[in-house]
Image (cartoon, grey):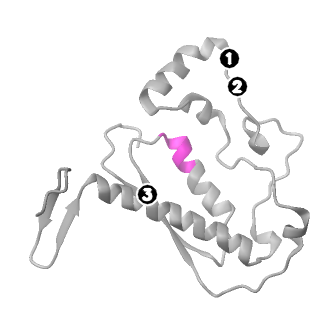
């Protein structure tokens, strides 16, 4: 095995050789971004029925993060917020308050939402690689993929836990 400046672990068997390293994780993350980018391109380039997309209108219900609005925390929760920053690198405490199926504003130009496109008979697999991720952000990511992808486009969602060390993942 050739050393490229990082530690490589080699698993060998009779039929294949598997390398596990940080660049492999980076590759998986790049593939995730490419998959998400592919879904975005698909939504811009091709049209599906509006009823296929989950658009929740619960305007009388107040929830954190609705329509992408900022969410705040009470001063009494400062200690929990500080702990979540140390543990996750972002405010996991407030993230736990945000709905898993939160709504987002449609920022498309009105003419873009009116355009009709042909549908290609294809499907997409979305791979989500995570390491020591909080449950709310991981599940919200999965729900966003499910709720904002056309039924005929999304084939599967693959979750890959990259050897998390925390007990909540």
Q: Is residue 124 visible?
A: yes
Asked whether 137 or 28 is in front, the reply is 28
- Between label 1 and label 3, give the one nearer the viewer: 3
Membership of 10 in magenta stretch:
no
Residue matched to label 2 = 72
Q: Considering the whole magenta stretch, tell me its main secondary structure.
A: helix
Q: Magenta stretch: residue 137 in it?
A: yes
What span is in magenta? 134-139
Disc 2 vs disc 3: Cβ atoms closer than 8 Å?
A: no
Which residue in the structure is indicated by mark 3? 29
Q: Residues within 10 Å of mark 2 (few under 14, many from 20)?
A: few
Residue located farthest toward the front when viewing the structure as drawn: 5
The residue depicted at 9 percent of the width and 77 percent of the height is 14
x, y percentage for residue 83?
47, 21
Q: CA distance from mark 2 to mark 1?
A: 7 Å
- Circle 1 residue: 74
Q: Position of residue 41 (x, y in %)?
A: 66, 71
């Amino acid at each position: 095995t050739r050393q490229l400046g990082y530690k490589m672990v080699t698993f060998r068997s009779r039929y294949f050789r598997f390398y596990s390293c940080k660049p492999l994780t980076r590759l998986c993350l790049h593939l995730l971004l490419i998959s998400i980018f592919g879904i975005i391109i698909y939504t811009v380039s091709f049209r599906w029925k509006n009823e296929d997309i989950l658009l929740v209108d619960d305007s009388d219900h107040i929830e954190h993060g609705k329509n992408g609005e900022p969410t705040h925390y009470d001063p009494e929760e400062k200690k929990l917020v500080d702990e979540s920053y140390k543990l996750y690198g972002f405010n996991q405490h407030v993230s736990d308050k945000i709905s898993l199926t939160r709504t987002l504003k449609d920022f498309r130009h009105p003419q873009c939402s009116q355009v009709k496109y042909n549908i290609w008979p294809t499907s997409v697999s979305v791979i989500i690689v995570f390491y020591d991720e909080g449950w709310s952000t991981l599940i919200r990511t999965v729900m966003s993929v499910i709720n904002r992808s056309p039924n005929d486009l999304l084939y599967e969602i693959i979750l890959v836990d990259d050897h998390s060390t925390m007990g909540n993942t």
